[in-house]
Amino acid sequence: LERSRNLSHLMSGCLSSPIVELLQTIGTIADQFLFNAFVVGGFVRDLLLRKANIDLDIVVEGDGIAFARKLGQHLGGRVREHERFGTATIILPQDLKIDIATARLEYYEYPAALPTVELSSIKLDLYRRDFTINAMAIQLNPEHFGRLVDFFNSQNDLKQMAIKVLHNLSFVDDPTRIFRAVRFEKRMDFTIARHTERLIRNAVKMNLFGKADDPRFFTELKLLLNEENASPALERLAELGLFPFLWPDLKPHLSIDRRFRHCLVQTQRSIAWFKLLYLTDRYEPWIIYLLTIMSRSSMTVLANFCDRFQLPQRNRTMLLSEKQLADNASHHLSARSELKNSDIFVAFRELHIEGLLYLMAVARKTEVKKAVSAYVTTLRHQAPLLNGDDLKQLGYRPGPPFKKMLEALLLARLDGLTSTRDDEIAFLNDYFPLSDGH
Ligand code: ATP
């Protein structure tokens, strides 16, 4: 080993004791199998940066699946096995997940492998990774617990805040790594090293990924758009010449123009606004960004995008319907001179948060932006004071009209026509008189 630093102190300082104990357990069980076991990748990178990361990627030099079964049994977790790849995932309570991979000698046949054959399998495993900063390991076997395995001078690159590939064919082997490079660069405020950037530009020039049918392109794009602030990463993708590949139909697709940049900033703002108000609500930022990017494209162009990148049906349906609903709502509301709360409610009620925040970001009219704000913060939470039981009590016969009546009550309430229960009862008397057969 080039460097042999021991990180056990750093580990006990930065990690919670259950995680440290879990890593120790992994090492102890590996010893029973006479395997070497390592935690690798982003976990090690983040530990050295003193950042929390609870995704455990484990590599064992030996049968990873047999090992995972034993470990899963010991920890009382669910084990999903992927026989073909020699990998397994152990799902533990509290969202904790352990991925286990096998470092196998067959990796020697890999075309981009180093010419020498005197390599340990962990070294080959690390050599096949995306960037030097992600290619470190920490040994877990009790005798060597905490030993940092750094074959590629990764510690130095981490210090220099540099994103570097491990070999010149890296992007030829796997062009999705370009998205990863940009994602890490912007997330950590690192820089893609000069040679690595040249390799990216070459790969783009060679049109290495004319085909987008590897579903990992979409996976990586999604991860990039879900980062804390996706705008700088998008700018970087444009600058590296990736927009024609991603959005060939986008009109000024070679650069990000002023209006486009403005929309991206607005998207970021509307997401931040929502997050501040509804900390625990779940939504998918990547959908909002994609809708913004394609806001001036037709439905067909969006559908083509979904086809080309093989989006799962669920994502495709969501994107298309949110665009349609949001664009219609915007059109409808823009045409009105005065907006009643009930108009806003009816226009927006089928939209998800993603579509609403998209609309907030791209709407040209202030009234539309304000309408989204009012809907998200108050209107969508409103309900009439009376419910179905009350209607029965009042003598109405239960049935399909109940829905219409409750809706009318809600809209009246939104527009301030009613405020007390008595107002609502009076409203029903006016619009749904009992003698009418209701
Ligand atoms: P994050 O912090 O976003 O989870 P990560 O580094 O943990 O980042 P993952 O996508 O979870 O990233 O991947 C785990 C590890 O697997 C990486 O650290 C890297 O070593 C390796 N890896 C992932 N994708 C690739 C790829 N396309 N090519 C090579 N190695 C990869």
Image (cartoon, rainbow, N blue to C red):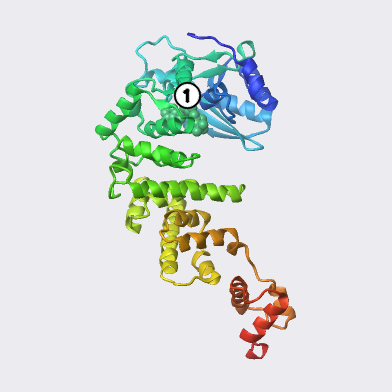
The residue sitting at 50% across, 24% down in the picture is: 41
The answer to whether 396 is drawn above or below residue 69 in the figure is below
Q: Is residue 336 visible?
A: yes
Tell me the crowding category of disc 1: few under 14, some 14 to 19, or many 20 or more residues within 10 angstroms, Cα based.
Answer: many
Q: Quadrant of residue 192?
A: top left
Q: Nearer the viewer, residue 8 or 49?
A: 49
Image position, residue 123 (x, y; %): 46, 16
> From the viewer's perspective, is 368 left or right of 406?
left
Q: Nearer the viewer, residue 377 or 137?
A: 377
Q: Is mark 1 within 8 Å of ligand 1?
A: yes
Element under disc 1: helix
Q: Is residue 311 visible?
A: no
Q: Dot 1 corresponds to which residue?
A: 134
Q: Quadrant of the C terminus?
A: bottom right
> From the viewer's perspective, is 52 left or right of 189?
right
The residue sitting at 69% across, 27% down in the picture is: 18
The residue sitting at 63% across, 10% down in the picture is: 143
Image position, residue 141 (x, y; %): 61, 15
Q: Nearer the viewer, residue 213 or 220?
A: 220
Q: Quadrant of residue 165?
A: top left
Q: Nearer the viewer, residue 74 or 411?
A: 411
The answer to whether 119 is drawn above or below residue 83 in the figure is above
> From the viewer's perspective, is 16 left or right of 282?
right
Mark 1: amino acid: Asn
The residue sitting at 45% across, 65% down in the picture is: 329
Image position, residue 206 (x, y; %): 24, 32
Image position, residue 392 (x, y; %): 72, 79
> From the viewer's perspective, is 143 left or right of 117?
right
